[in-house]
Amino acid sequence: MTLALTIGVLVFGAVFLMLQRGLVRIILGFVMLGHAVNLMLMSAGGVFRRAQPLIGYNPADVVSDPLPQAFVLTAIVIAFSITVYMLTLAATGSDDDTEDLS
Amino acid sequence: MVLLILLLVLAAAVIGTPLADRALGRHAGWLFAGVLLALAGVVLALAPSVLADGHTPGFTLPWMPQIGVGLSLRMDGVGWLFTLLITGVGGLIMAYSTRYFPPGRRLGFYLLMTLFAFAMTGLVLADDVVLLYVFWELTTLTSFYLIGLSGPGASRPAIRTFLITALGGLALLTAVVLMVLRVGTTRLSEILADPVWSQDPAFATTIALLVAAAAFTKSAQFPFHYWLPDAMAASTPVSAYLHAAAMVKAGIYLLMRFTPAFSDLAVWNAALITVGLITAVVGAVFALQQHDLKLLAAYSTVSQLGLLVAVIGVGKEAALIAATVHTLAHALFKSALFMVVGVIDHQAETRDLRELGGLARRMPVSAGVTALAALSMAGVPPLLGFVTKENIFKGLLEAPGPMWVGPSAATAAVLASVFTFAYSFRFAYGTFWGTPRGSTDVHEAGPGFLAGPAVAGVAGLVLGPAVPVLNRLGERGAADTTGTYYPAGLSLWHGFSVDLFMSLAAIGFGALLIRWTASGERMAGRTLFPVNGPTVFEFLHEGLVGLGRRVGDLTRSDSPTRHLVMPVLVLTAMAGVAAGAGIEVPDQYGGTTHPLDWPLVVLATVAVVGAVMTGSRMACLVMVGVAGFTTALWLFLLGAYDVALTQLVVEILTVVVAALVLRRLPRRFHRAPRSRTVLTALIAAAAGVSAALGTYFLTGRRDISGPGQYFLDHSEEDTGGTNVVNTILVDYRALDTLGELIVLGVSGLIIIAVLNSSGLLPSHGSRWVVVSRRSAAYDADDNTLIMRAISHVLLPLLVVWSVYLTVRGHTDVGGGFVGGLVAGAGFALVYLAAPSASVARIKLAYPKIIGAGILVAISSGALGYVDGSFVKPLHTGVSLPWGGSFHLTTALIFEAGVYLAVVGVVLTALNQLGLEESRPGDSTLGLMAPTPDQPPTNAPEEGSGDHPEDPLGTVPNGGTR
Amino acid sequence: MSIIDIALAAVVVSMIIATYRVLRGPSGADRGSGSDMVFYGFVALVAILGIRLGTALLVDIVVVCTLVGFLAAISLARLTAGGKR
Amino acid sequence: MTPTQIAGDVLILAGALAFLVGAIGLLRLPDLYSRLNGVTISGAFGPALILIGLLVQQPSVGNALKVGLALVIQLATSAVGGSAMARAGYLTGAPQAEETRFDDLVVELDEQAGKEHPGYSRPDT
Amino acid sequence: MSAALLPLMVAVPLSAAGLLALAGLPPWLNRVLLLAPSAGTLVASTVLLWITRDGTVLSHNVALWPDGIAVPFLVDAFSALMLWTTSLLVLVCAAFAIAVGDDRTSYFCPLVLVLSAGVAGALMTGDLFNMFVFIEVMLLPAYGLLAMLGSPRRLRSGRVYVTLNLLTSTVFLAGVALVYGAAGTVNLGRLAGAAADSSMVAVGMGVVLLALSVKSAVVPVHGWLARTYPSTSPAVTALFSGLHTKIAIYAIYRLYAVVFDGDSTYLWIGVVVFGATMVVGVLAAVGEETTRSILVFHLISQIGYILLGVALFTELGLTAGIFYLVHHMIVKASLFLSTGAIEKAHGTGALDRLGGIAAREPLLAIAFMVAALSLAGIPPFSGFVAKLALVAAAFQAGEWVVAVVAVAVSLVTLMSMLKIWGGVFWGVAPEEADRPVHGPHTEAGSTPVLVRPEVPAAMLAPCVVLAATTSGIGLGAAVLLDLGSTAAANLLDTSTYVEAVLG
Amino acid sequence: MRAKNVLNRILGILWMPVYLAYDLLTGSLRVGWEILTPGSRISPAFVEVPLRCRSDFEISMLANLVSLTPGSLTVAARQDPATVWVYSMYTESHGSTLRYVHGMEDRLLRATRLEGAPPRPQDLERGERGQRR
Ligand code: NA
Ligand code: NA
């Protein structure tokens, strides 16, 4: 439940930031959303087993599912790549404001 | 087979047009006239077999067998008549065209005319509904271009015509689809013979209405009639062919073709008779109102088509005999009249009746031809038109339904004929007799020009007395449409009968009308309705365009927020629906909550609340960083150390890069009105609740997954690695990792590319932040010395540590990504510690590092083919000199590639975003530019073919111009 | 609740206080100092969690944390001064 | 619990409390510069105690090396970070506490123009 | 062709991209390295089409790990068809880009190569997470291409494009998480029918499909596409329209067939949504005033048509949808390129600033019109067969309303095509069409030259190739219908596919 | 002489952590007391401290030692002539801060130089309010 709660809180913050003016806040919102989804992937692997999947360190029955961890690692790096690019976009143009001029 | 040859000859004519045009110019028309008339001869030769013996030649070739569509052709009596008209009248018009146009090449015209002839022939011969539809649309299409060919003024009329007829086409398409689905074949003859039409009246009614709608648009029936006069923007040969003889007859053909299915359907009878007669009357009245001869002829066509539609609607044998022969008569007199209009227009340089008159003396042949055609149109004996029109009256008298229907219908037809008589008179008299007006310097046209109209006009005269030769045709037409043989008994004189009196009434009242209206002049120029068709069309068109603009306005925003909110709402709604519907979920597997989790929930909440509340960019960045670190701690708690480590480093690098960007922007965020904030918070709350509920109910409800257990059990044996996550990354799912590496590398490349194209905002320090210059703390060289000293110590430490993490990744916490990120952090440190931006730049060719990383990773993947598959890791144990052995795997090379790419990207971000400012095409990349010999800027290229005035600055070297 | 848990709570409370400073400012450098504090808090948390979870692996991570946390501090300082080196 | 464990726990608790003190300083101290001194407690003293506590609880050569390394790096970086932040604050005119007695930084370059510096608050008496 | 070679369709373009980033090669070599891998994929996918035409599914466990563990690469008729079409488009669009000089901008060539590699990977993978990765591989270059080429508005568009796609990718990932959470696997073979059996999986897959729907710009989440595609360079728009939304559509087809097993419970949602997409897209198109924005809204409208096939989920519906998909990719690219050529040559795509081009450039006009008529479903071009089959499928499935909508929308489609035709190809060009053209390097003071712009042959050729292809598909519809129905059969009965995944 | 120097230096290095720990502890206690008790007893000042350090390394080490000690903080530095500007929370007088930092410098130079710390310059002290004498 704690993890679900954390995810909910993060999603709230992420969506709130995403819906603001200015690309920077949108980007930061996405960074947060990325965290939430990564935790969701971890949660999908199950949160009962919590020992690190290093062979020989822990008893087999408490070792956590390594597959979601690999997914999350991949996802983190992909999200990072896009974040850095979006930050570049925020630094081009005339401002990072994203509202329509009218 | 003969049908296929017919079509193939026409197709060959189409394909041959460019050649003919090049060789003969406008005289190519003679060639095509020859071809068409020869084909008409072939058709005539088929008459004994088709008309007398009732043979129906056919042909079939598969086209789209999956949906049963074939290239099926069939010629019965109706098809024979229309084929004859298309080829015969077409031939005359082709000949006429050679004189109509000024000398020169006429590729477009001849191409489209032959294509039209091809399409029309295909249409009337098709025995496959889909094929029929194809040719139907092809006639629409060619007509569109033929009208548009007449220049800029014709473009709107062409478009209006196209859209109206296409509307009908869609009705036909719908009918076709429904019929095919219902009957299970695309063969037209089989469909028409199917019992479904009598068994399922609802279905029959639907199809009947759709087919009628298609025919009404094509044959210019009220209220779609207006396109036909509108299309008079086209050149005269086009009008003569399409708008008199052929295309408008496609609708008539369609109605006749489908009569077997619908003739007993009250809706069909009522719709056709009503619409047809309204059109006949209205068209005739309109015709009398025209000054322009061509428009007069056009409205006349509308009216005549109305009569045909109405009489087909009767659905009885006599009516269809009348329809068959009147179709022929109309084609003859109307094409003659249209061609004559062209002649008059040419010779007198006007076709306005107010400027014409008394030309008979100077243009006697034209006058004669016109008189013949007009008399036939007016239904005056002994011309063919008289006989056919009388048959129409007779046919209409048999209209099904209550007693009064037949007489009323016939009366309406007589009324139309009264006006017909009047405008026919006006046409001929007003032009050639009457008061001489306009230019007197008018001469008779040459024989080539007059041949076409003369033949058509004289044919009407000859066929009048010789009308019994058409008996076979009429009977066959009736038999093909009603299924029963009925003696036609056509003759110029067949005693006193009701229809003879009706003819006489039409002529008599017509004469009176001429008198009352002074040859129609008193009616001319008046309008019957307050609006005309094109206006209504354009009004609707504009309305649709305006509606479209408003629909487009809904999303016309460059604000990401506007576009982001919709998916979020949809997703939230979906969660709501799922929650509302209720989903069966198993119980949670084990406990999902641990006391140590709570501090993290608190931290996450604090971070989110802070990020949401603050107006400071920096504070928001820090708060998001806090959320990221909290996430990393979560990962620790969940046993994902590799991931947590990566998360930590990524988070820090994000902060570093974001800080480089934020210095270019105002310190505080843009403000938003309170209402927006509240709304946003509500949406965000809904999304948050959805995410939390989704996670709570849909995860954590099973034991470890099958693949997860497999990895734990086998990774050491399979790969020699004990860090299971790492073995998944570089061994089991190296493909994911390769993709991830590519994504990372490409992000570096696109950062460079975008900045080369657009440039950065200036570094806004001076604008947003006041920095005191009056202190010892100002000088950067001095004040960075502490950091530099530290970075000199830390950099080697970080690099060594990063290599250590990379190498040990397979067995312990670490890996190429974390390693690369740590090394990247080291470079970031050096960058940040440097005393000035120019010194700070790390002069490594970072795009090349990225490229090298990609190549190294893929090469190691390709090595896998040695063992049978891409990215299959190869293993070997290297025994060390001091005993023991080192487990060597190609996965390590893969890791090296990953490491390189990560370092390259971090360097890219730092160097590119760290610039004070950049302009588009800033050549800071020097040697790294992808195509160094082609400067990205606008600088002129040495030795290239580009001229300074080059309007296409973008054409590359050697561009063809 | 063990001693370690109390320590953990103390660090978390400290971090929340530091967060207040980040949000409150008033100067950019104040926000920066607050954020430094938060990051130190994370280092401390990782270390304490290492003890609490009884794993030595986290020490490695502490090293990385301290190394990279520094970057954030300098970046934010630079940002505070509007990019001035 | 063994004595080393107790000692370790105590060290860790002490470190955490020191941390807390630094944090409270962030609230209570009057200006950026004094607050940064509070941060030093949390950045150097607190972590040092915690890390040593960790070592005491899990003593090994490897851990000693790693903890030593972590300690050195933490001390060095927190010091540099503090300095950098102080300088950034000074450059952008972070306000100084009432009690500030004098400011040699400004005097250094230009005595007369000192007042124009937004951060200048050197008392006259 | 050994199935083990399938990953090469990803690896080869990626290697070329890596090489281009690594070494500063001469321009001609850049171009060769850009075109050769696509040509290779075209050839390879032709072979694959031949192999899979009878319903065969080629499969390979990448790195030879056991079933359910390895990432599987598969090709059946559907994916082979998509591979063929996408590689053709990459080839043609790249040729056009070279003709207009897009390839001279930084990293254009490697980015296009990576894009095509991502597309190939996404088409072949049989693993949900791997699909996410390849979609990202496809998207990253797109982010750059969109923002580095085209009008000054491209940066703002670039922001919309990135944020939208990032959101959907993240949502996709969340969906993958939920699926994994419920089913414990992301392997499509193991997930076969899972959503039909378990509502937990259905929700997860629903999230995935929603993300894909946003990516394919379905109403009401379509606005982003309309705002972003027109602002980049024409070649890139053509490339995106042919590849990006289409991969999402492909994935929707594939995933719905495999994981939902075509569950009819949810089909009505698709019918409603896709019907609305047709209508909204076409209405908006008719309201636009520049060539590309009209075409872009059409793109949205046509996406409704294509997806209707999967919402019907009958054999005819799927066949029609797949046929429509392939037809649309080609035709749309052709239209973007032919109007793009005009845009490049005349410096504008505004209808009121162009005119009379048909008379001066008849070949270009024909190429445009063929594609435009095909788009509107006028026979004998491929669009007609597509529309016919789809409408028939809709009627057959008893979806009368949407069938009539599909028919009606095609008239409005024709209307907006004629709007372009009337505004650009017919009529008269306004005075400024002959406006003095300053070369980019004109020295101040030199007299501007009056130039009547003309589309060079190098730009014309790609448009003509694609227009010829659509005519060919229309006249030789049997071939594509055959392949489409094989593909549809594979979707209806996924057992072959699933067996191939699981070995 | 040489051996003695080396020994001296080694001792200097070994003593450093001890001094540091001591400074850290006392500084933390002093500032902690300030934080935890009501009222304010601080008398802060920014003090310019001329140094005998020569290399970047020495200067940074000194600056860091100063910063590490709660109660004092390096705000700015200069390479030539070597100087640091120290923020000191408890400034009794200009001279007291100078003496404090120079004491640290002595210990540092003993660890970094074979020849040990040079004598402290005597003419740098300023008056109560920081004016040069
Ligand atoms: Na125009
Ligand atoms: Na200090």
Image (tube, coloured by chain):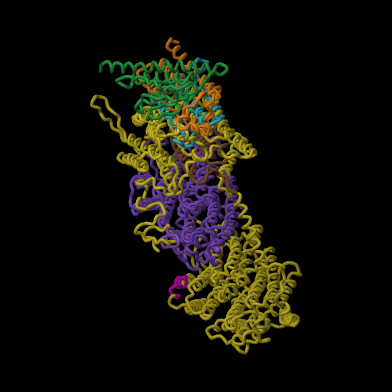
As drawn, is B354 to the left or to the right of B712? right
As drawn, is E20 to the left or to the right of F37? left
Q: Which chain is cyan?
A: C
Q: Nearer the viewer, residue A14 or C83?
A: C83
Magenta stretch encompasses residue B19: yes
Q: Position of residue E62 (x, y in %)?
A: 38, 40
- Which color has been applied to chain A in this rendered view? brown
Q: Which chain is yellow?
A: B
Q: Decide whether the magenta segment is chiefly helix, strand or loop.
A: helix
From the viewer's perspective, is residue B500 above or below residue B831?
below
Q: Position of residue F113 (x, y in %)?
A: 31, 21
Residue B641 picture quarter: top left
Which range is magenta?
A: B11-21
Q: Which chain is green?
A: F
Q: Position of residue B131 (x, y in %)?
A: 53, 64
Magenta stretch encompasses residue B479: no
Q: Which chain is orange?
A: D
- Residue found at the far top of this picture: D3
- Which color has been applied to chain E in this rendered view? purple
Residue B889 picture quarter: top left
- Residue found at the far front of this picture: F133
Does residue B591 show up?
A: no
From the viewer's perspective, is residue B669 above or below residue D43?
below
